[in-house]
Image (cartoon, rainbow, N blue to C red):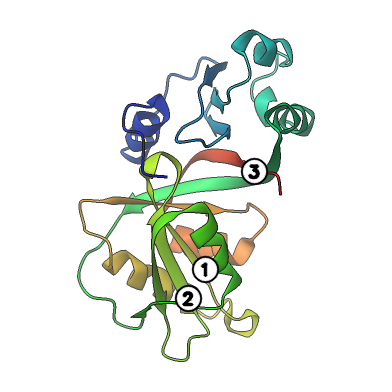
Amino acid sequence: MAGDTSHPIQQILEQAAHGVFPAPHGTTSVLPPCDGQHGVVAMTAALFVLTDVAEPEVLRRLDQTVVGAAMRSPFLTWLAGESAMECGFIDLVLARRGIGGVPRHLYKVDSHDSSRVTRSEKHRDDVQILATADRKGVVTIGRGLAGRRELSIELPTDQRFDGLGRQMIYDGLRAIGPNDFVFAQVSPGNAASLRAFLATEFCPIGSEVLFTASP
């Protein structure tokens, strides 16, 4: 995903990161896929469907009287089927600026057997891997939807809720320039991860579900 800077969703995401959101008219806009990426991006009373399915057919499938109908499971299932793709998870999207500097507790590594790294390398470009000294904790930074920089973390289950996640996020932010925005996608039900990102001053900007090619 090199990042199509001419695609409307790139500007929408960038402006939202700055705190400027689309007008909340309760509308759903149909846009072409961005760098081949299909899915739905939702902000307050403004939704964007990324698809190559014809716009009239997409809108016909939506209940226009219901704000946010494009994030309902029946529509997402239908859209994924029409696109011959698999529907991903509905994630909360958060953003903040980097810190800059040198990570204090993480070290750059060329590879890692973490499932988080495998997922990042499958769905992102230019993936950078940072790991703790014992390699049990890992942070990935890469380019995702519309070329945005994305950060994700993984740590052992027995080390959650003790502040390590926050420490790792801050270290990841040190690998990103202070003028550059970074995004995170977090499952709303993943309380540990969500609390860590909120505690490190990531701000929610919307939600999204992205599709992947069927195997």
Between the residue at mark 1 and the residue at mark 2, the CA separation in whole angstroms equals 8 Å
* Mark 3, residue position: 213
Which is more N-terminal, label 1 or label 3? 1
Residue at image location 34% in from the left, 30% down from the top: 11
- Number of other residues with Cα within 10 Å of mark 3, as a class: few under 14, some 14 to 19, many 20 or more: few
Q: Residue at x 63, y 52 (%)?
A: 188
Check disc 3 and report its element: helix, strand or loop: strand
Q: Secondary structure at mark 1?
A: helix
Label 1, residues with CA under 10 Å away: few <14, some 14-19, many ≥20:
many
Rendered view: 36 above or below 22:
below
Q: Nearer the viewer, residue 28 or 54?
A: 54
* Spot occupied by residue 148 in the image (x, y as percentages of width and height): 37, 45
Which residue is most to the front? Answer: 215
Q: Is residue 20 visible?
A: no
Frontmost of labels 1 and 2 is: 1
Nearest the eye: 124 or 199 = 124
